[in-house]
Image (tube, grey):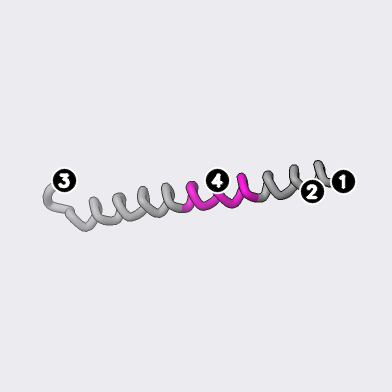
Amino acid sequence: MEATPNLDWLLGGLAIAILLGGMAMLLSGVSGMDEASGKAKKK
């Protein structure tokens, strides 16, 4: 594995990108749900 440091960098980058993307999706999903529930309660 030490002979391919580039592979480690790629895997690390993918993991970070997936984590950041997942967090962004969760945050946007939660805010969207809050807005929807807020509108429903107002009605």
Residue at 79% of width from left, 48% of height from top?
39
Reading the image, the residue beneath label 2 is 39
Between disc 4 and disc 1, the foreground one is 1
Residue 29 x/y as whole percent: 62, 47
> Does residue 36 appear to the left or right of 16 in the view shown?
right
Question: Can residue 12 be found in the magenta stretch?
Answer: no
> Does residue 36 appear to the left or right of 23 in the view shown?
right
The 10 Å Cα crowd at callout 4, few under 14, some 14 to 19, many 20 or more, is few
Please report whichever mark, 1 or 3, sits nearer to the chain's N-terminal start.
3
Q: CA distance from mark 4 to mark 2?
A: 20 Å
Amino acid type of the residue tagged 4 in the rendering: Leu
Reading the image, the residue beneath label 3 is 1
Between disc 2 and disc 3, the foreground one is 2
Mark 1 residue element: loop
The 10 Å Cα crowd at callout 3, few under 14, some 14 to 19, many 20 or more, is few
Amino acid type of the residue tagged 1 in the rendering: Lys
Reading the image, the residue beneath label 1 is 43
The 10 Å Cα crowd at callout 1, few under 14, some 14 to 19, many 20 or more, is few
Specify the segment rendered in magenta. 21-31
Reading the image, the residue beneath label 4 is 26
Q: Are marks 1 and 2 in contact (CB under 8 Å)?
A: yes
Please report whichever mark, 4 or 1, sits nearer to the chain's N-terminal start.
4
Residue at 55% of width from left, 48% of height from top?
27
Above or below: residue 7 compared with residue 40: below
Residue at 75% of width from left, 43% of height from top?
37
Residue 31 x/y as whole percent: 63, 49
Amino acid type of the residue tagged 3 in the rendering: Met
Mark 3 residue element: loop
